[in-house]
Amino acid sequence: MAVRQIRVMGDEILTKKCKPVKEMTERNLELIEDMFETMYQANGVGLAAPQVGILKRIVTIDVEDGNQYVLINPEIVLEEGEQTGYEGCLSVPGKSGIVTRPNHVKVKAFNEKMEPYELEGEGLLARAICHECAHLDGQLYVELVEGELVDVGEEEELEEEE
Ligand code: ZN
């Protein structure tokens, strides 16, 4: 396992559409292991393969709910509700911005054994799934930010809306 270099905004690779994974190979397994290691080292809750320079539709997520999610060729099939809150990205270091996302999503994907499965998530998990899947199509959250990007640590308390 190895920590890989995280690409940052401005790197063209982050704007490209990733290719579907056709089969699980040693190389892909190693990539998945490295993605988890890279994500944990950077204190992230999610990482997409293009963030380490690989244009494959692979996402890793760990929102500290006791699971390590691997989503290969993910496809969001259901979005419900709404949540508005600060979001950050390991490819946009030191910044945070307000993004509205669905509060509940269902995603179809394959696991690291290339077995199909479905994952449903709420709250932070739903946010992470949406954020990471967008990376696979070359989209960064900064395009969705309401207002300005702020420095991490300077987020203001969001007012609860009735
Ligand atoms: Zn990101």
Image (cartoon, rainbow, N blue to C red):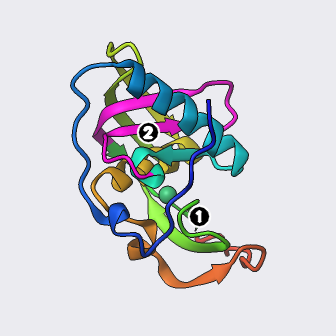
Residue 81: tell me if it is visible: no
89 shown above or below 21: below
Question: Which amino acid does the dot numbered 1 rest on?
Answer: Gly
Instruction: Please state if 87 lies on the left or on the right of 115 as rendered.
Output: right
Q: Is mark 1 within 8 Å of ligand 1?
A: yes
Question: Which amino acid does the dot numbered 2 rest on?
Answer: Val
Q: Is residue 96 magenta?
A: no
Residue depicted at 49% across the width and 61% down the height: 7
Image x and y of residue 48, in percent: 44, 46
Task: Give the label, 2 or 1, closer to the camera.
Answer: 2
Quarter of the image for the C terminus: give it.
Answer: bottom right
Mark-to-mark CA distance, 2 and 1: 16 Å
Image x and y of residue 49, in percent: 42, 45
**Residue 108 falls in image quadrant:** top left
Residue 88, numbered circle: 1
Image x and y of residue 22, in percent: 21, 25
Image x and y of residue 52, in percent: 47, 50
Q: Nearer the viewer, residue 14 or 95?
A: 14
**Tag 2 secondary structure:** strand
User: Over which residues does the magenta segment extend?
Assistant: 53-78
Residue highlighted by disc 2: 59
Residue depicted at 56% across the width and 35% down the height: 34
**Residue 10 falls in image quadrant:** bottom left
